[in-house]
Image (cartoon, coloured by chain):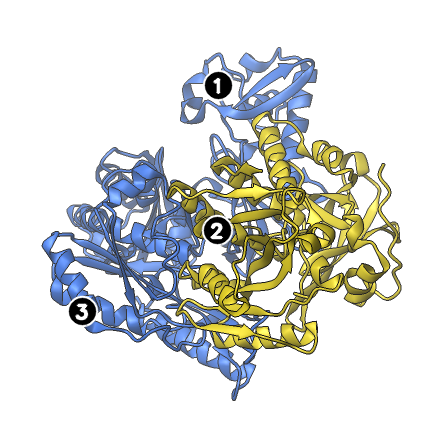
Amino acid sequence: MYRIGVDVGGTNTDAVVMVGREILAAVKVPTSPDVTTGLMEALRQVRKSAGIDAASVAMVVIGTTHFTNAVIERRHLSETAVVRLCLPASQCLMPMVDWPQDLRSAMGEHIYLASGGMEFDGSPIAPFDPAEISRIGAEIGRKRLTSIAICGVFSPISDAYERQAADLLRQACPQASISISASIGQLGFLERESATILNAALAALANRTVRALQDGLAACGLKCPLYLSQNDGTLMDADRAQRFPVLSFASGPTNSMRGAAFLSGHQNAIVLDVGGTTTDVGLLQNGFPRQASTTVDIGGVRTNFRMPDVFSIGLGGGSIVRAEDGLSTVGPQSVGYEIVRRARIFGGDVLTATDIVVAARRAAIGNPDRVANLDVRLVAGALQVMQDRLERAVDSSRVSADPIPILAVGGGSILVPEKLGDTLVTRPPHFEVANAIGAAIAQISGEVDRVVSLEGTTRETALASAEADARRKAISGGAVEESLVVTEREDVPLAYLKGDATRVRVKVVGDLQV
Amino acid sequence: MRYLTEADIEALEIGAAILGTGGGGNPYIGKLRTLQELRNGRSIRLISLDELNDDALVATVGGIGAPIVSIEKLEHGAEGVWAVQALEAHLGRKIDALAAAEIGGANSMMPMITAAQLGISVVDGDGMGRAFPEMQMTTFSIYGHRSVPAVLADERGNLVLFKHTTSEEWFEKLARATTVAMGGSSVGVEAPMPGRYVKRAAVPGTVSQAIALGHLVLAANRQHADPIPLICKQEGGVHLMDGKIVDLKRHLRGGFSVGEIALEGIQAFSGQRGSIVFQNEFLLLKQEGVVRVSVPDLVVLLDVDSGRAITTDVLRYGQRVAVLGLPCHPLLRTPEALKVVGPAAFQLHDVEFKPLRAA
């Protein structure tokens, strides 16, 4: 059976057909404004190129930045009721306090604080009060709001009260889609709450989008299930994707890194994903991107998603090259996707980073005669600038002085020289569609992040219990039990807290049951 | 006397993080709360030590507890007010002004919030001029004033009065146990003292100092200028090196994050080597094996490009940092102070404190 992986990017929609570890076909088509048309075209072409019929496709996995863009552009967001379980704590700052005003207004400021938060050890700050939640539900119902976010203090330790609140609110507002924070984020209240609110606000859009994608598949004669790829490089099924759109926010960089790992066979490496305007730099650890430990800003909102620790530098194939006072500069301004018209080698009049590598005979694309007479010092200077910035980016991604492979992927990766520092750069085959391949090979995960007291128990028991819960989560998500492996496992004793309070985090990953 | 503006509070967040020398907790939530007080029409009145009345009663206020709890369970918001009122009831008189025990990091904001709510003044000075890991490491305590009587408050309105403890260490121990029982975080109002003592024992001008530092960094960022030489000039500090972290060892000891960083010089400092020891805060910088800066002088790590402070919890291999040595206030360099906040107090027994020499 075949798997199809698709990356719906801002410029191109890429699709690949895979069977086992083999890549049968890869195509690139322009992304359409409605997403679906471009997707259908990519699916049609890639199936034709691979020569396979619709019935033999087992699954389609899509990676998309659609939901991220909706937040950034403030489009298609629903008014959302926010129910915070916290009282008497956490009254000092209201939900969305640090959001940009326009985005906060889009949510409608329907804010309710109730009891039902927890302490770090899972005991209640104040008892959960069902009557209080039902009263809130009645008011949300009267306002006819259709999306609700619930966030309880220390809910990553136990989501019992968030779930009870969700049940009560569902009775009062049967039409509403409800997001609870324990399913979405980690410890760090304001950031998790913000992520939960964004998720709830995206629910209606997610619903429409996922259904449109499913319709697109059906129109192509594909009857197989549809999956979306998540921030951590694992899959969610169409139902889950409708409920957790925020979990796809960083799927783009994650997929390209996972794809690079697959294509090169390296599980530990630094990945440079070179696009038209920027290069994303990240670190692969055991085949997965290293996760960011700090907050991530999306559309002006601080969140603490499980996001890959990827940073961007302003260097891509379309970066504009200038000579200033005898010094060459490269970027951050770029001609972006217009490179196919505006770069010198493509007949344009803008000198880009791509022109430089063609002038230096490091790549043979476009018309090299158009850059034959460039000042050699300008070319050498620009190459040196690119080399320095890439080496610096690679250095910042290292976690130790040990040698580590460097992988270059993405359409602009011809900019990357043969060697960075002492390391030879690997450019795996199919590097230009690493993203879609990352989507095609996505797996299923389960994760637990909580603070436990080691009083009367041991560190090993606590980790084992967290692992068992993480496994249960993965299996309920569709993972094959036998394929599960632990990818993250850590325990951090917490300063100042007696009773041996320890933060425990375990993540398992496995293959999808097909 | 001056009233602080929203821009001052934004600057304070940055400056307090720099004076935090890698520790002190993140001032972000405190900043949001302080801005909110201003937007709600309250004001923050900052008075210099000179303007403080000799007979005025001043207390310190700050959050106590594990940073993970303070970012997950936010405060009710009135804890500081409740604790001040409870202490006033015990003392039978009004508290006239509040001060930070610790200007470095998150606790820089607590006096602003509570004083704004109560309509009283904030004293331009604190007990550290930086961040330290333990409560008794304040100049107020070093020069003979006791932290008790003190009141700890939680979000439920529980108020615990410490009428008397037999030593500062006992107060630290009991306050910590109380904080854990309160759910891992509390707000403490401590060390009520007369204005005349504060004038003598407080590290002076540290609130304005932190705000000025923040304004300096923000202005440099806006003009795409390098803030580092400006910071050194303003603080009488030394830009000791720019380096890349080439090794990072970290472990937990007695509830503290303890470790050591190795640095390799970059750019103008290429070829040099340095190492830094930390325990929540950066304590010591050695260059070529020789101690260049040690606690209580400030070892400050800044992002090479932005000039923003780097804290010990986000250190990582390959990071490019600027290392600055900033002189601490003379009040922290006396023999009595060095006993409590000198190298030996951090188990650095082979290090003798030598004041940082300005370049």
Q: Chain letter of disc 1?
A: A
Mark 3 and mark 2 on one chain: no
Q: Which mark is residue A168?
A: 3
- Is residue A176 in sight in this rendering? yes
Could you tell me which secondary element the residue under label 1 belongs to? loop
Chain in yellow in the render: B
Q: Position of residue A393 (x, y in %)?
A: 62, 41
Q: Pointer 1: what residue?
A: A343
**From mark 2 to mark 1, how far is it between C-alphas?**
56 Å
- Of residue A12 and residue B204, the one placed in the foreground of this image is B204
Q: Pointer 2: what residue?
A: B113
Mark 3 and mark 1 on one chain: yes
Image point 35% across, 71% down: which residue?
A: A473
- Of label 3 and label 1, which has the lower sequence position? 3
Note whether A496 is above or below A44 in the view shown: below
Q: Position of residue B229 (x, y in %)?
A: 73, 32
- Of residue B195 and residue A452, the one placed in the foreground of this image is B195
* Residue kind at label 3, given as amino acid type: Leu
Image point 62% across, 35% down: which residue?
A: B217
Residues packed near mark 1 inside 10 Å, few (<14), some (14 to 19) or many (20 plus): many
**Which one is closest to the eye, mark 2 or mark 1?**
2
**Which one is closest to the eye, mark 3 or mark 1?**
3
Image point 44% across, 76% down: which residue?
A: A121
Chain in blue in the render: A
Q: Chain letter of disc 3?
A: A
